[in-house]
Image (cartoon, grey):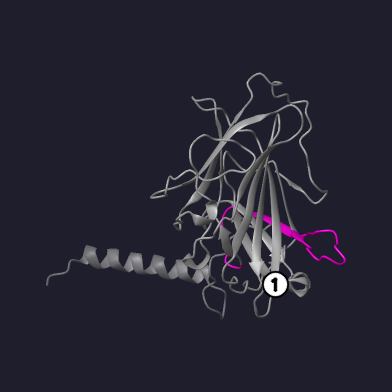
Amino acid sequence: MHVTRSTCLLVGTLAGALAFTTRASAKPGGPIAAPKVHREAKPKGPKHPKVHHRPSPPLPMLVGIENVQLSVGANYVLVTTDLTIPKEDLGPGDLRLFVAFGAPGAPRAFEAKLLDLSQRTPKEPTSLALERVPSCPAHARVVLGRPRMAGMVITLRREHLKTAWSNQNLAIVRLRAVLTPPAHEVDGGHEVLVRLGAPEQLPITVRSISIEPSGTSSTVTKARAQLCGQGADSVPLTVQGASDSQPTLAPILAVRHEDDDLCVRYWVDPDGDAPSSSVPVPVPGRAMTRK
C-alpha cells in the first residue's frame, strides 16, 4: 500500500496530541484519575420500624352469625352482627379476623367487643383492638366479605378467648357499625347490604335477622331480607320486628353460597318526623373507631 508523506505527518501529529492529553490528566507516578460523580445527599428523617405480625392461626370450624340486627334512626342505621366462635385448640398466637365493609359505604363509626355470657359473674364486654385496612393482610383470616375489600382487622388475644371459653364453649364477638342512611329506592324502601362470609370455603350460617326503630323519630313499617350476589337464592327471609304479608324462610334454613351477602330492605313511616342532622348519632362506647 502506498503511503504519502502527508499521511505520515497527520498520523504522527494525532498520536502526539493524544499522548500529551493523557499525561496532563494523569498524576505523576499513578494511574489516571477517574472523573468525580456528584451524588446528592439523601435527606435524613426518622426511621419507622416495621411491625411484623405473627400469622393468625386457622379459624375454628363452624364459625357462625347468631344474629344480624338493624337499628334504624332518623339520620343513621346501626348494624349489629354477633359472630359465634366455638371452642377449639387454635395453637400459638392471637386470632386476627378480617371483616369487610358492607353498603351503602364505609361506616361512620365501628367497634368490636368480646361478650362475657357467664351466668354467675357477668363482666363488661372486652373492647378489641381494631386496624382499618384497604384489603385483608397476610396475617389475618377472612371471616366476612372477600380478601380484596376494605375493612377492619380485629385482634382477639389468646388469653381473652380462653377466658370466654372457660365459661362456655362459645365465644361471641359483637360488631357494631354506624352507617349513613341509604337513599330511598323507587318503591320508597331503603336497602342495607351486610357482608357474610365463607371461611375455608364453608358459608357462614345466619340464625336470625331483626330490625327495630331507634329513637322516636323513625318508625319501621315493613322490612324484607334475602341473600344477594351472583347465583344467590332469592327466597325472602324472616325478619323479626317487621311484618310482611309474603311467606318467608328462617335464615338458618336458607341455601348459602360462598359469594352471598345479606340485603335488608326496610320502609319507614312517611308521616313520621323527617330525618334531621341535629339528631345525635349513637356512639356505643368510647372505643368506637370513627371514620
**Three-letter amino acid code at the position of disc 1:** Asn
Question: Is residue 66 part of the magenta span, yes or no?
Answer: no
Magenta: main secondary structure equals loop
Q: Is residue 196 left or right of residue 7?
A: right
The N terminus - image quarter: bottom left
Question: Is residue 126 part of the magenta span, yes or no?
Answer: yes
Q: How many labels were placed on the picture? A: 1
Q: Quadrant of residue 124?
A: bottom right
Vertical order, 175 against 19 (above or below): above
Q: Residues within 10 Å of mark 1 (few under 14, many from 20)?
A: few
- Residue 34: give x, y in percent of width and height: 53, 70
Q: Which residue is at 63% across, 44% downward?
A: 210
Highlighted magenta segment, given as a residue range: 114-139
Q: Is residue 41 visible?
A: no
Q: Residue furthest left?
A: 1
Q: Residue furthest top?
A: 271
Q: Nearer the viewer, residue 101 or 282?
A: 282
Q: Quadrant of residue 174?
A: bottom right
The C terminus - image quarter: top right
Per the image, label 1 sits on a secondary structure element best described as loop
- Residue 42: give x, y in percent of width and height: 66, 59
Q: Nearer the viewer, residue 258 or 23?
A: 258
Q: Nearer the viewer, residue 27 or 281?
A: 281
Q: Residue furthest right?
A: 121
- Residue 197: give x, y in percent of width and height: 53, 57
Vertical order, 162 against 226 (above or below): below
- Residue 131: give x, y in percent of width and height: 69, 57
Q: Is residue 220 visible?
A: yes
Q: Which residue is mark 1?
A: 169
Q: Which residue is at 32% across, 68% downward?
A: 12
